Image (cartoon, grey):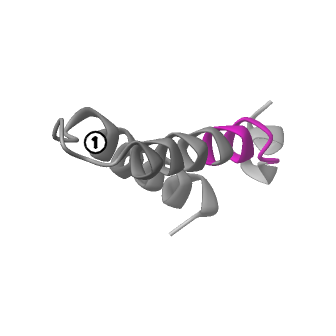
Amino acid sequence: MSRRMELEKEIEIAQNNIEKATPDTPKEVVDAWKKELDSLAFELNNLYDDDELEDS
């Protein structure tokens, strides 16, 4: 599995965790999930793909 696909899957999981968090989920846990999501999204947005260059 490519790193891009791994990141997309991890982002999906993080988004689901945040969206489906119950009201009694500790704020610290939700904040950690949001921080992880931001980090994953940043990595994905800055990912260098050799395949993209070959297609252009």
Residue visible at 34% across and 51% down?
A: 13
Q: Main secondary structure of the magenta part?
A: helix
Left or right of residue 35, residue 16 in this image: left
Residue visible at 72% across and 47% down?
A: 43
The residue that disc 1 covers is 16
The residue type indicated by label 1 comes to Asn
Residue visible at 60% across and 53% down?
A: 4
The image position of residue 16, as x and y in percent, is 28, 42
Residue 45 part of the magenta-drawn span = yes
The image position of residue 39, as x and y in percent, is 67, 46
The image position of residue 3, as x and y in percent, is 62, 62
Query: Dividing the image into 4 quarters, which one contains the C terminus?
Result: top right
Is 34 or 25 nearer to us in this picture?
25
In the image, which residues are magenta?
A: 40-48
Left or right of residue 38, residue 17 in this image: left
Is 15 or 56 nearer to us in this picture?
15
Residue visible at 81% across and 52% down?
A: 50
Is 54 or 2 nearer to us in this picture?
2
